Image: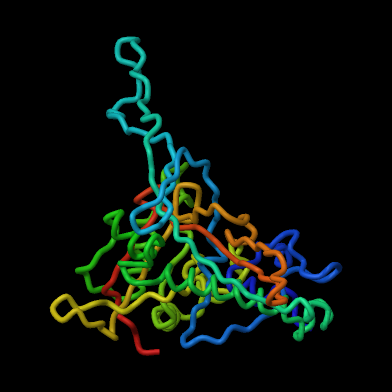
Amino acid sequence: MLNPGSHLRQMGMGSYGAPEQVLRGSSMHGAGRSLAEPVFVPSVDQSPAELLAALTFRRPSAVSTALTTQGQTTMTVKVQRFVAGDQGANPLFDQGNPPPPVAFEVGAETEFTLQRMGRSVATYAADLSAAEPGAAGNARQSQTIAAISQLLYWMNKWLGGPLAGQVGFKSVLQIADEANRTNKSTDLAVDVAARRLLTEVWTRGEGAGEGIDCLLGNDQMLRSLMTTAGDTPNCGLWIDRRSGLNVYHYLGIPFYRVPFPHKIIPETSEPDPTRGWLVGANLGPMGLQMVHVTGTAESRGIQLDVQPLDAAAGTVVQLVQAALTPVLWDPYGILGFDSVAYSAS
C-alpha cells in the first residue's frame, strides 16, 4: 500500500511532517481514513504543485468585504506600514537631544480580490456502503479526492499563468510585475540570473539569510540550471525543509517547478522557445503568501461541505470549495527575469 497522502502531499495538500492531516475531521465513512488517500489525476501537461506545498497560507481578519461588478469578493484588511526616516550618517544624539521618533502609518488599507473555485460530486446514497473506506471502489471517497486534486491543479496552473492571470487570482509573474520587480530586457545565462536573484531578493529583517527562499521556473529552466550548475556539494537533489519534498537545490536554495510560459517576443507577441522566466521569491512573513477564507492552512484553504440527501435523485452531494489569492507583502521579496536562456539538456 502506498503511503497515504503521498501524492496529495506532492500536489500541495499535506503539511510538512503530517501528510495524513489534510482536511481535518473529514474522514469519509465512520472509521475510514481521511481524504489524504493516494490519487492520480491525468492531465494534458505536467503541473507539479511544489510551490503550493511550500507557500504559507494565512487567513487575515477582514475589515470589510464587498462584491465587484464581476461577482468576485474583495477583502479589505488594515496593516501598519513602516515609514523609513532619514537614518543619517551618525546615530549619536546631537547635543544631547534625542532623535525624532520612528514614524509609522497606522491603518493603511490593502485590498485583495479572492478567486472562488469549487467542484461538486454526487454519489448515490445506496453506493455509500457498497465499498470499504479507503478502497478504490469507494465512489464517495475517490470522487471527492479527485475534486480536491482538480482544485489544486487549477491553483498551480494559475500561479504560473500569464501576466493576466485568472480573474481574482494573480499569477506569480503578475505579482512581480505589479511590484515593478520584473526585468524584461536583459538576456542572461541561467546561472548568472540565479546568482543575481540570490543577492537581489530580500525582505526587511535582521540581515544575512533573511532574503530569498526559493527559485521558480518551468521544467525546462530547471534542466538548464541543473546542466549548468552540475552536481556539487552545494547543488543537487535534497529534501526541502519547507515543503518536505525532494527538490533540486542551487547553492542551498530550492528550485520549485511552476508552469511559467516562455518569453514573449514584443514585436510578434509570440513565445520564444529558447528563453523563459526565472523568478526568485521570499516566502517568509514579509514575502509571498496565500490568503484564504475557507478551510484551514493544513487543507490549503480547501473546505469540504456535505449537502443533504436529494430524495428525488437518491444522491448525496459533496462540495469542495475555496476562496483565495496569493499576495506579496514586501515588493523586494520577489524578482523575475523573462529573458533567461535555456541551455541544451
On the image, the x and y values in percent for residue 95 come to 30, 10
On the image, the x and y values in percent for residue 92 come to 35, 20
Q: Nearer the viewer, residue 4 or 238?
A: 4
If the image is split into quadrants, where does the C terminus sit? bottom left
If the image is split into quadrants, where does the N terminus sit? bottom right
On the image, the x and y values in percent for residue 42 come to 56, 87
Residue 15 quadrant: bottom right
Vertical relation: 50 (above or below) 288: below
* Residue drawn where x is 33% and y is 82% of the image: 342
Seen as rendered, the residue at the extreme front is 312
Q: Nearer the viewer, residue 269 or 112?
A: 112
Residue 78 quadrant: top left
* Residue drawn where x is 59% and y is 62% of the image: 302
Seen as rendered, the residue at the extreme left is 267
Q: Nearer the viewer, residue 175 or 253?
A: 175
Is residue 66 visible in the rendered structure shown here? yes
* Residue drawn where x is 48% and y is 59% of the image: 213
Q: Is residue 320 left or right of residue 100?
A: right
Give the colouring mode of the picture: rainbow
Seen as rendered, the residue at the extreme top is 96
Vertical relation: 331 (above or below) 117: above
How many discs appear? 0
* Residue drawn where x is 35% and y is 67% of the image: 165
Vertical relation: 125 (above or below) 85: below
Is residue 202 visible in the rendered structure shown here? no
Residue 82 quadrant: top left
